[in-house]
Image (cartoon, helix red, strand yellow):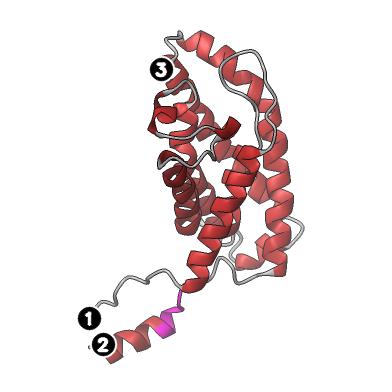
Amino acid sequence: MTTPRRLLTTTDLALIAAFAALVTACALLPAIEVAGPVPITLQTFGVLLSGAVLGARRGFLAVLLYLVLGAAGLPIFAGGGSGLATFTGPSGGYLISFPFVAGLVGLLVSAAGALLPRRGPSVLFSATGAPLIFVAAMVGVALNHAAGIAGLHLRADLSWRAAWNIDKVFWLGDTFKAIAVGVVAAAVHRAFPALLRARPSRRTEAGAASLSA
């Protein structure tokens, strides 16, 4: 008999809420205005870190919670923006991609622990952890930028080339954010090595299955 899908625990919910608050704080820090309709903020750092620290599921939900609260009217988007209209503006592509970026980074970081079979998840807690997490974060950055360029093309009535010319300004800053995410997330996983291993073990699941049979 199959076991029921694991529900979110109180700890999971607390982490999701905490990282939604972290993304909010990053978004509300003063932005750097550049040429074009999209400012530079630390929002992306919070999104990437959510996935890198919490993993795919909780990272996705933390950033989704942030977007839901902003869509409901709380002024927590960059520049104090809020509401559903924000998603149809020039930066809408970047915003909409955020939960998927966090989920993808979380998935890659979780998989990185199995990249070296002899070392297993401990690879995330070693000196090689930060570079691996940086690579995962950069994949997330690429997804975010792809969605952002599509949003600029569709919502700001720009050609693909013009949208890319606006977007390319953000790559250097986001690369530094990904480096910071690698360093911070590796340190967090060294301090809390079970953070990405919150799921029950196979033996525990088997025991639960036998009890529910």
> In front: mark 2 or mark 3?
3
Q: Residue at x 60, y 57 (%)?
A: 53
For the residues bearing labels 1 and 2, Cβ distance under 8 angstroms: yes
Element under disc 1: loop
Instruction: Name the quadrant of the C terminus.
Output: bottom left
Q: How far apart, in angstroms, are the residues tagged by discs 2 and 3?
A: 52 Å
Percent position of residue 136, x then y = 59, 45
- For label 3, the residue is 155
Nearer to the camera, 134 or 184: 184
Q: Residues within 10 Å of mark 1 (few under 14, many from 20)?
A: few
- Report if residue 200 lies within the magenta region: yes
Query: What's the magenta region?
Result: 199-204
- In the image, residue 68 sits, relative to residue 110, either above or below, namely above
Q: How far apart, in angstroms, are the residues tagged by discs 1 and 2?
A: 8 Å
Which of the marked residues, 1 or 2, is nearer the chain's N terminus? 1
Element under disc 2: helix
- For label 2, the residue is 212
**Residue type highlighted by circle 2:** Ser
Q: Residue at x 49, y 25 (%)?
A: 91
Nearer to the camera, 76 or 55: 76
Percent position of residue 96, x then y = 43, 35
